[in-house]
Image: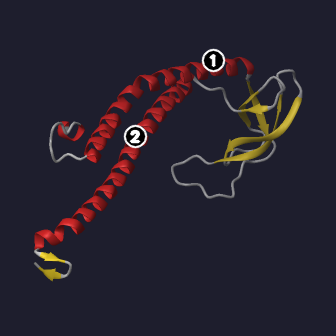
C-alpha cells in the first residue's frame, strides 16, 4: 500500500503511477476527514428534529375518531401483518367543531369503533408527532448518509480515474510497442534485418 501511494525513486514509476498514488492517498484521507463533519451535520439535524418534535407535541392533540363504517380492504392481507385501510370517520376538534374525513384503521374494525388520531389546532388530521427516537434516527441517518456519500464518491472518483489512467497507459504501451517491437523482433518495414 505504501508503494502504491508513494512510488518514491522507482525508475519504472511513470507520472500516471504517481498521480494514481496521490489519488489513492486522497481517497483514503477524505473519508477520515469527513467523519467529524458528518457527526456535526448529524448533531445539527438531530437538534433541529428534536425542536420540531417538541413543537409538534405542543401543537398537536390526540383525539378519538369514530368510524362511520367497517374498515375493509380490497387488498388481501399478508399473513403475519396488520392491514390498515382508510375508512370514513368523524371526530371533534379541540374547540369542539365536528370534522369528517378518512382515518387509518385496522381492517375488520367495526363501525362506531373509536380510533386514535392526531389533529392540529384547527382540528385537521395530521401525522403523529415525531418522537425523540425519531429525531435521533433522523440525525443518525443524516450523518451516515453524508459520510457514505463522501466515501462512495471518493471510491467512484478513484475507480473512474484509475480506468482513465489505465486507458492512457495502454495507449502509451501500444505506441511504444509499435515503435520498438520491430527492433526487438528483428523485423523492420516488413523485411528481415
Q: How many marks?
A: 2
Numbered badge on residue 51: 1
Look at 84% across and 28% down and name the residue there: 92
Q: Position of residue 180 (x, y in %)?
A: 18, 66
Q: Is residue 150 above or below residue 95?
A: below
Q: Position of residue 130 (x, y in %)?
A: 62, 26
Q: Secondary structure at mark 1?
A: helix
Q: Which residue is mark 2?
A: 154
Q: Nearer the viewer, residue 10 or 162?
A: 10
* Image side of residue 150 versus residue 4, left or right: right
* Image side of residue 144 versus residue 58, left or right: left
Q: Position of residue 160 (x, y in %)?
A: 39, 50
Look at 18% across and 39% down and name the residue there: 3
Q: Quadrant of residue 36?
A: top left
Q: Residues within 10 Å of mark 2 (few under 14, many from 20)?
A: many
Q: Is residue 87 above or below residue 133?
A: below
Q: Nearer the viewer, residue 44 or 108?
A: 44
Query: Is disc 2 in contact with disc 1, using a CB cutoff of under 8 Å?
Result: no
**Nearer the viewer's eye, disc 2 or disc 1?**
2
Look at 70% across and 41% down and name the residue there: 104
Distance of mark 2 from mark 1, alpha carbons? 34 Å
* Image side of residue 117 versus residue 13, left or right: right
Amino acid at each position: 500500500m505504501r508503494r502504491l501511494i508513494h512510488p518514491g525513486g522507482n525508475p519504472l514509476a511513470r507520472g500516471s503511477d504517481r498521480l494514481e498514488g496521490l489519488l489513492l492517498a486522497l481517497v483514503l484521507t477524505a473519508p477520515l476527514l469527513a467523519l467529524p463533519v458528518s457527526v456535526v451535520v448529524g448533531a445539527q439535524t438531530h437538534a433541529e428534529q428534536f425542536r420540531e418534535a417538541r413543537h409538534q407535541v405542543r401543537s398537536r392533540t390526540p383525539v378519538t375518531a369514530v368510524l362511520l363504517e367497517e374498515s375493509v380492504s380490497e387488498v388481501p392481507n399478508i399473513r403475519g401483518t396488520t392491514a390498515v385501510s382508510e375508512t370514513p370517520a368523524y371526530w371533534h376538534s379541540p374547540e369542539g367543531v365536528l370534522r369528517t374525513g378518512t382515518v387509518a384503521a385496522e381492517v375488520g374494525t367495526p363501525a362506531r369503533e373509536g380510533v386514535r388520531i392526531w389533529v392540529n389546532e384547527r382540528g385537521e388530521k395530521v401525522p403523529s408527532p415525531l418522537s425523540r427516537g425519531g429525531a435521533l434516527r433522523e440525525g443518525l441517518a443524516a450523518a451516515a448518509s453524508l459520510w457514505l456519500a463522501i466515501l462512495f464518491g471518493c471510491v467512484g472518483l478513484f475507480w473512474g480515474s484509475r480506468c482513465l489512467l489505465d486507458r492512457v497507459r495502454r495507449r502509451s504501451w501500444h505506441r511504444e510497442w509499435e515503435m520498438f517491437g520491430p527492433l526487438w523482433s528483428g523485423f523492420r518495414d516488413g523485411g528481415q534485418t
